[in-house]
């Protein structure tokens, strides 16, 4: 396959970064090792920095090389998606939007996504992907997702984020726990028991904030447990593992005669969810869907100004 020079060199860097072996990379690219070495030398001359540290035995990425290769992979993903969308347009295949969300997001937001109807795209299909917060943001940037619902995403100038919901983090606990007697719970009320929480990689920002709020309050768990599925906490609570921190929309269905659900009173544990898409997103269908979703979430809000411009701008 003949690539334009820039694409060819990027593919060479990606392949060598994957293999960390000139022999294996050359085999994958179906070129000789001298030709591979020549390409890498040409690429490093063009970018002006060393991408690979190599000697007779090892090949390693430099720190700058890691950043460069990551960018090459993102660019390759964008190109692949552009080709896929163009082919679908050419073949008049039904349009598809891929939308990501966390397994811990409020189910009502997912329902709002699924209920969006675009009159001009009656045959639109939605592909839903569940993944952790950092993976969601990266997948939007890499164009693997068109849109995502992310709770407390990190700031990124390459992403556009529109706040769509605020809800307290909740505590799921046995009904006989003293803190269950009130309408809300302070994290100070949760000492001397075990805590169950989602894995840190699921929501690093929220996870760290919970532990920091606890530290400032002088509170800590007897033991710290991690759950993947929120439904796991019901059995763990029945087995006296303690109390669980669960997002509000996911926590409420867990309430029963034996289990109480109470919101945390700390303002810093009010969690905000956002609709997120690429800042340079120019696909009309993606933007139309985003606006339609915002109208579902804010049915009574004024979304346009006197000039017809979106106030919640995507």
Image: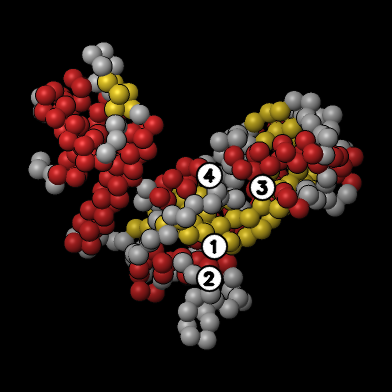
Q: Is residue 33 left or right of residue 135?
A: left
Task: Name the residue tied to disc 2.
Answer: 312
Task: Measure how far apart labels 4 and 3 are at the Cα level.
Answer: 14 Å
* Disc with the residue nearer the chain's start (3 vs 2): 3
Q: Position of residue 124 (x, y in %)?
A: 36, 63
How far apart are the two marked residues, 1 and 3, measured between alpha carbons? 19 Å
Q: CA distance from mark 4 to mark 1?
A: 16 Å
Residue where numbered disc 3 is placed: 247
Question: Residues at badges 4 and 3 in contact (C-beta under 8 Å)?
Answer: no
Q: Counting other residues with Cα less than 10 Å from the Cα at mark 4, is it few (<14), some (14-19), or many (20 or more)?
A: many
The alpha-carbon separation of the residues under discs 2 and 1 comes to 7 Å
Position of residue 141 relative to residue 86, above or below, is above
Which residue corresponds to the image point at 36% horizontal and 35% vertical from the top-left? 64
Q: Is residue 314 visible?
A: yes
Query: Secondary structure under badge 3?
Result: strand
Task: Give the number of the disc on residue 162.
Answer: 1
Q: Is residue 104 left or right of residue 11?
A: right
Q: Are marks 4 and 2 in contact (CB under 8 Å)?
A: no
Q: Residue at x 30, y 50 (%)?
A: 78
Q: Nearer the viewer, mark 4 or mark 3?
A: 4
Which of these two is toward me, 210 or 242?
210
Lower position in the chain sequence, tag 1 or tag 3? 1
């Amino acid at each position: 396959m003949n690539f334009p020079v820039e694409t060819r060199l990027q593919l060479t860097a990606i392949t060598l970064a994957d293999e960390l072996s000139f022999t294996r990379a050359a085999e994958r690219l179906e070129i000789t090792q001298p030709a591979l070495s020549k390409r890498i030398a040409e690429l490093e001359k063009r970018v002006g920095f060393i991408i690979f540290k190599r000697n007779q035995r090892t090949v390693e990425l430099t720190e700058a090389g890691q950043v460069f290769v990551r960018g090459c992979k993102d660019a390759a993903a964008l190109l692949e998606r552009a080709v896929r969308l163009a082919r679908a347009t050419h073949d008049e295949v039904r349009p598809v939007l891929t939308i990501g969300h966390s397994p811990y997001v409020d189910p009502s937001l997912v329902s709002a996504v699924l209920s969006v109807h675009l009159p001009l795209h009656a045959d639109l299909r939605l592909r839903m992907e569940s993944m952790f917060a950092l993976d969601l943001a990266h997948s939007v940037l890499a164009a693997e997702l068109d849109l995502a619902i992310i709770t407390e995403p990190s700031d990124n100038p390459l992403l556009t984020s529109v706040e769509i919901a605020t809800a307290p983090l909740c505590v799921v606990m046995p009904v006989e726990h003293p803190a269950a007697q009130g309408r809300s719970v302070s994290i100070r009320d949760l000492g001397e028991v075990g805590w169950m929480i989602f894995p840190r990689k699921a929501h690093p920002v929220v996870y760290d904030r919970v532990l920091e709020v606890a530290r400032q309050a002088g509170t800590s768990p007897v033991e710290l447990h991690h759950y993947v599925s929120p439904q796991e906490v019901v059995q763990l609570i029945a087995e006296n593992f303690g109390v669980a921190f669960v997002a509000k929309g996911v926590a409420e269905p867990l309430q029963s005669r034996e289990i109480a659900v109470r919101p945390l009173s700390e303002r810093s544990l009010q969690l905000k969810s956002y609709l997120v898409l690429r800042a340079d997103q120019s696909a009309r269908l993606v933007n139309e869907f985003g606006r339609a979703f915002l109208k579902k979430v804010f049915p009574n809000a004024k979304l346009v100004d006197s000039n017809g411009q979106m106030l919640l701008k995507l």
